[in-house]
């Protein structure tokens, strides 16, 4: 049985996998960051941040649960606004950035969690240890065009981890009880991404002439 070109194209469109509807977005390091907070001396919260956050987000707007994200954070950029503390955090007592210079996250599952909210499960690798975590995500936002013609989207993700799960166990006991550094760490990712040009679009347009 012969099939016309039009029928073949229609069949391919129906049978095509859902990733055909996904768009690729590259994280903008200049407008993305990873912040954290941890208890100090059992009385206050010390906050810090990492810059140079890179990664790729594949967003499937037809079925958001088929979206994926991979991020890499430069651990050497840690900044708590106290140089001596930052050097200590980079040392083998904590992140050991000479040996483990990056922190990575790779999604394994995306689930809806309400209007414009998601739960993104994935593998977090830090200090050479990989553990599953779940990010609570607000977004992604709708597309927005900047003054230079780039399409942008944003999202905010939060989670809590125990640093001891990743081998970050340094501490000092306090005379009054408790420890100098808390175990629970609150993490917030503020992400902004630009749409990646479709590499296949240009050749396809050329062939269509």
Image (spheres, helix red, strand yellow):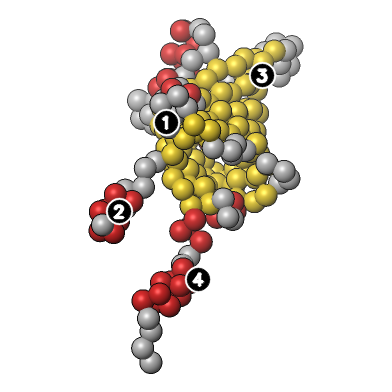
Q: Are marks 3 and 2 in contact (CB under 8 Å)?
A: no
Picture coordinates of residue 74, whole percent (x, y): 41, 27
**Hey, which quadrant is residue 45 in on the image?**
top right
Q: Report, in whole angstroms, how far the alpha carbon at label 4 lies from the one at label 3.
A: 54 Å
Q: Report, in whole angstroms, how far the alpha carbon at label 3 lies from the one at label 2.
A: 56 Å
Determine which residue is flagged by label 2: 205
* Residue at horizontal 35 percent and vertical 25 percent from the top: 98
Indicate which disc residue 14 carries: 4
Q: Secondary structure at mark 2?
A: helix
Q: Pick the residue in front: 62 or 120.
A: 62
Q: Are marks 1 and 4 in contact (CB under 8 Å)?
A: no
4 or 2: mark nearer the eye:
2
Q: Secondary structure at mark 1?
A: loop
* Residue at horizontal 71 percent and vertical 46 percent from the top: 113
Q: Secondary structure at mark 4?
A: helix
Give the vertical position of 19 relative to 5 (above or below).
above
**Dot 1 or dot 4, earlier in sequence:** 4
Determine which residue is flagged by label 3: 39
Q: Quadrant of the N terminus?
A: bottom left
Q: Is residue 151 left or right of residue 177?
A: left
Indicate which disc residue 149 carries: 1
Q: Are marks 4 and 2 in contact (CB under 8 Å)?
A: no
* Residue at horizontal 56 percent and vertical 23 percent from the top: 35
Q: Pick the residue in front: 198 or 110.
A: 198
1 or 3: mark nearer the eye:
1
Q: Quadrant of the C terminus?
A: bottom left
């Amino acid at each position: 049985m012969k099939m016309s070109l039009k029928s073949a194209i229609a069949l391919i469109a129906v049978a095509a996998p859902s990733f055909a509807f996904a768009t690729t977005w590259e994280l903008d390091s200049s407008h993305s960051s990873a912040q954290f907070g941890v208890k100090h001396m059992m009385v206050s919260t010390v906050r810090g941040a990492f810059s140079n956050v890179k990664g790729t987000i594949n967003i499937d707007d037809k079925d958001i649960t088929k979206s994926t994200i991979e991020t890499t954070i430069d651990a050497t950029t840690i900044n708590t606004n106290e140089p001596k503390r930052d050097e200590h955090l980079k040392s083998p007592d904590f992140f050991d950035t000479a040996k483990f210079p990056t922190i990575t996250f790779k999604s394994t599952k995306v689930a809806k969690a309400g209007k414009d909210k998601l739960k993104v499960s994935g593998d977090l690798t830090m200090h050479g240890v990989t553990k599953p975590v779940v990010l609570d995500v607000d977004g992604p936002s709708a597309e927005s065009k900047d003054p230079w013609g780039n399409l942008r989207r944003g999202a905010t993700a939060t989670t809590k981890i125990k640093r001891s799960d990743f081998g970050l166990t340094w501490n000092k006991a306090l005379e009054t009880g408790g420890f100098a550094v808390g175990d629970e760490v609150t993490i917030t990712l503020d992400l902004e991404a630009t749409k990646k040009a479709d590499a296949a679009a240009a050749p396809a347009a050329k062939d269509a002439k």
